[in-house]
Amino acid sequence: MTTLFIPKQIDDYAEKYTSPESPVLAALNRETNMKRGDAVMLSGHLQGAFLQMMSHMIRPECILEIGTFTGYSAICLAVGLRENGHLHTIDIDEELVEMSSRYFNNAGLQDKITQHIGEASEIIPAINESFDLVFIDADKPNYELYFDLVFDKIPIGGYIIADNVLYGGEVVLPAEEQSKNAMAIHRFNEKIRKDNRIEHLLVPVRDGLMVVRKIKDN
Ligand SMILES: C[S@@+](CC[C@H](N)C(=O)[O-])C[C@H]1O[C@@H](n2cnc3c(N)ncnc32)[C@H](O)[C@@H]1O
């Protein structure tokens, strides 16, 4: 999704007054755009800086990312880890591993990041960790499932951030005009709204980020 919900001029202004991309992230952004037709999936400067700031604020010991792609958001999130902290990231596409692991090395984060290749719904239950922060950014029809799979692995006070929750603005269209992905995202947003175990904030940065804080177990 590339839809900008704010005028381009304002988006450019926001980027200008946001700390610049690190040289490693800028190179990864460039290489992804040169080599991948689906580069639009990469979080990018503004959203990446937001994720990095959130991670610095939370200081997580353990992060789970669902949807690595070329590694941009994983790097942003991992820089906020506590000393000895660790990030697990999952992607189904093994062709991405060469580029993402090269950039994890370039960022000096290779020892802090474990890459899992395969179906996220099978891998999540097999990672025996408690996560202070989970970033959901993979296939949209499974967002609700991913939320359910990670919920018990998050302590009270832990966070979930889900990407693309505005889905290019489609979520506000009548149901018959929404794509399958937009419908799935809308269902996810409704599930979040009705869940009294959490506090949540929909941040209209880029394609929309749902920030969730767990306040009770049940
Ligand atoms: C939007 S991209 C992730 C972008 C990345 N988080 C970033 O900001 O740079 C979504 C990724 O999810 C992966 N994916 C899709 N379905 C998946 C599944 N069922 N299990 C694991 N990964 C999946 C895709 O291969 C793709 O790389």
Image (cartoon, rainbow, N blue to C red):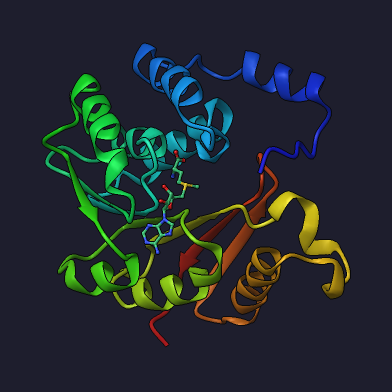
| Front-most of residues 57 and 81 | 81
Residue 119, picture quadrant: bottom left
At x 38%, y 11%, the residue is: 23
Relative to 59, 135 lies left or right: right
Residue 153, picture quadrant: bottom left
Residue 147 percent coordinates (x, y): 45, 72
Relative to 88, 42 lies left or right: right
Relative to 135, 5 lies left or right: right
Relative to 145, 107 lies left or right: left
Furthest-right residue in view? 174
The N terminus: image quadrant: top right
The C terminus: image quadrant: bottom left
Residue 58 percent coordinates (x, y): 37, 47
Residue 133, picture quadrant: bottom left
| Front-most of residues 75 and 116 | 116
Furthest-bottom residue in view? 218
Count the marks. 0
122, above or below 6, in the image: below
At x 75%, y 40%, the residue is: 3
Residue 107 percent coordinates (x, y): 25, 22
| Front-most of residues 50 and 106 | 106
210, above or below 128, in the image: above
At x 12%, y 41%, the residue is: 84
134, above or below 218, in the image: above
Residue 117 percent coordinates (x, y): 24, 54
